[in-house]
Image (spheres, helix red, strand yellow):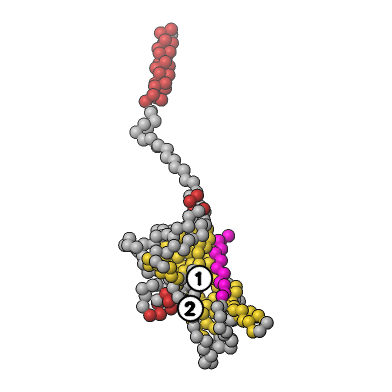
Amino acid sequence: MKFTHKLCSVALLATVGVAIAVPSITKADDTTFKGDMDIQFTRNTADDTDTTRPTLTDSNGSLDTEIISGTITRPLKPVVFGIQDVTPLSFGKNAIVTDGNDRVFWAKNYTEPKGIMANNVAIKDVRSTLNHNYTLTAQITKPMTVKVKEGSETVDRKLDGSTLLYRNIGRKTNVAEEIALPASAVVAKAVVTEDEATTIVDNNGADKDKGQGQTYIHFGKLNAAGDLNSTKSVSLTVGKEKSIFEGNYTGEVTWVMTAAK
């Protein structure tokens, strides 16, 4: 009986020994290791003061001269989100005609001593945001007005009720197409009046990454033929019922860029 007891004790010790050895045999997988990465980004503070115009390129990488030729020094307003510039519309000198028809006048290209540019609106969106949706609208907020002086009397005479036609509208951008303002978000033509704001850009697509960078909303192209040319892309129509006086008329168009909420 005593011998039998000793055998049983040895067997128990052997069993315990096997149980202790199991963890040292089953090791963790040491052929795979996950290394960490990190990078930090900060806001580009240069946008707070940058007034230079973006360089636009064609898809093949060549410089795009369809809307700008030569050197344009007109500065841009530095913004993170908003409108950087609107070219002034100059309809030039025209003879007063009263033939019973509406009078139509075409805006000239914006010109400088060393450059020429199709009329355009420059916008920018470099916000760090998940939603780059926005709209761009235009409205005549001051009709063409001239001061008429007769004797001791001076009065303002307005070409109220006149309309602006923007056509051949396109867009040029300085960022990749995957995040640029979609061409489909820009209307092909629009009539702008005093009555209410007219939408020119409706960037409210499902892909909220689109709309980034700097964008020219331009009216016609410098090298286009016929009615597609930039000199035939913005017109002022004065109703036949309006009296036109000699003098220098000035007016105002208000553009508003509104971020989606």
Q: Is residue 104 magenta?
A: no
Residue at the (50%, 67%) spot, across then down: 86
Residue at the (42%, 15%) spot, across then down: 13
Give the labeled residue for mark 1.
88
Point out which mark residue 123 bears: none
Q: Nearer the viewer, residue 20 or 227?
A: 227
224 relative position to 252: left or right: left
Residue stretch in magenta? 250-261
Point out which mark residue 92 bears: 2
Hey, what amino acid is under mark 1? Answer: Pro
Q: Is residue 255 magenta?
A: yes
Q: Quadrant of residue 24?
A: top left
Q: Is residue 64 above or below residue 164?
A: above
Image quadrant containing the N terminus: top left
Hey, what amino acid is under mark 2? Answer: Gly
- From this viewpoint, is residue 198 visible? yes
Residue at the (43%, 7%) spot, across then down: 2
Are there few (<14), some (14-19), or many (20+) residues within 10 Å of tag 1?
A: some
Total labels drawn: 2
Are there few (<14), some (14-19), or many (20+) residues within 10 Å of tag 2?
A: few
Residue at the (50%, 62%) spot, across then down: 84
* Comparing labels 2 and 1, the label whose residue is closer to the camera: 2
Q: Residue furthest bottom?
A: 99
Q: Position of residue 12 (x, y in %)?
A: 43, 16
**Dot 1: what SS?**
loop
Q: Main structural element of the magenta stretch: helix, strand or loop?
A: strand
